[in-house]
Image (cartoon, rainbow, N blue to C red):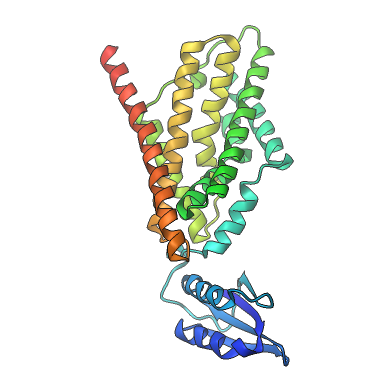
Amino acid sequence: MITIEVIAPSSNEDAIIRIAKQNEATDFWLSSSSEKQVAIKILVDKSKSQKILDQLQKLMKGKSNFRVLASPLEIALPYEKTSTSNSNVTISREALLSQLKVQGKLDSHYLMLVFLSTIVAAIGLIQNNVAVIIGAMVIAPLLGPNLALSLSTTLGQVNGTLDALRTLVVGIAFALVISIVVSFFYPELVLTTELLSRTSVGIDGLALALASGAAAALSITTGVSSVLVGVMVAVALLPPTVTLGICLGIGAFPEAKGAAFLLVANIASVNLTAQLTMRFKGIKPREEDKQRTALLVFIIGILCWCALISYLIYDLYVAQIVT
């Protein structure tokens, strides 16, 4: 359930109540009123919140004294079982944008987590310690920028896409530099099995990345905890990045090429399925003109990711024939 509070001019009271009734809101009431303004609260099921918010946005267009506040409701008595289950409900577009704007922000907190997770992952890969590698995945902050990139592309927000892409690229580049520096502290470093396992593109690795992207999009759009999904995305992205840096640091360039291919393939796979899942869940702009732009940006994004994946699969197939 979601509580939507509308603060609007008094002249819009009837229109707001009509919107609540048309969308079969669970309940609505006038919380306060004056000659100039009214405050109306609407209690609605999560699955119906997006339509109500869209209609309220149309109603408030061009008005400065109109505000809409939405917040999730944890407990409501008496309990009413709705026809939709939480696992199938898509949270509102506005909630997604607000959440992913924070998760995909390029700031000192993000860079510090990248630094710490890279150090831990590098030590785990060099020491061939799977437990340490998994520990690094828990603190890696790579879920946010990937989901922000997919959402911005799905909504056709060019500026948001560029911001998310910048956050992702800076994070990957920062992890790469740190990995190269770490390799200098191991003068007799040898490529362990954990490192070698991330120097080639395999169907299993692509499947993991594809599943991670879909799971990430589902978790964020249904409001389910995305902690474990964040670990999945980190598994697909951070180890190949760290492996690439270590291989470059010790001069193992053929292995570095394989790790770079794996990293690019995983980034493309995660974002491909995340975008497709968000589109499947019906996430799109409210305005019709923006929907056309969003569809164009979405198609361009899908084609770019598919082209990258196709090239890497082709390269994998040719390599297998040669060997």
Question: Is residue 45 in sight in this rendering?
Answer: no
Asked whether, in this view, residue 321 is left or right of residue 305, the answer is left
Question: Which image quadrant for residue 8?
Answer: bottom right
Question: Is residue 114 in sight in this rendering?
Answer: yes
Residue drawn at (51%, 40%) of the image: 233
Placement of the N terminus among the 4 image quadrants: bottom right
Using the image, determine if residue 20 lies above or below residue 83. Answer: below
In the image, residue 261 lies at what x, y percent? 44, 24
Using the image, determine if residue 271 lies above or below residue 85. Answer: above
Residue drawn at (48%, 49%) of the image: 153
Judging depth in this view, the residue of 34 and 78 nearest the camera is 34
| Residue situated furthest left in the rendering | 321
Placement of the C terminus among the 4 image quadrants: top left
Using the image, determine if residue 169 lies above or below residue 179. Answer: below
Question: Which image quadrant for residue 16?
Answer: bottom right
Residue drawn at (33%, 28%) of the image: 313
Asked whether, in this view, residue 261 is left or right of residue 178, the answer is left
Judging depth in this view, the residue of 269 and 57 nearest the camera is 57
In the image, residue 232 lies at what x, y percent? 50, 40
| Residue situated furthest top in the rendering | 188
In the image, residue 275 lies at what x, y percent? 43, 49
Using the image, determine if residue 172 lies above or below residue 155. Answer: above
Looking at the image, how many numbered discs can be counted on the residues?
Answer: 0
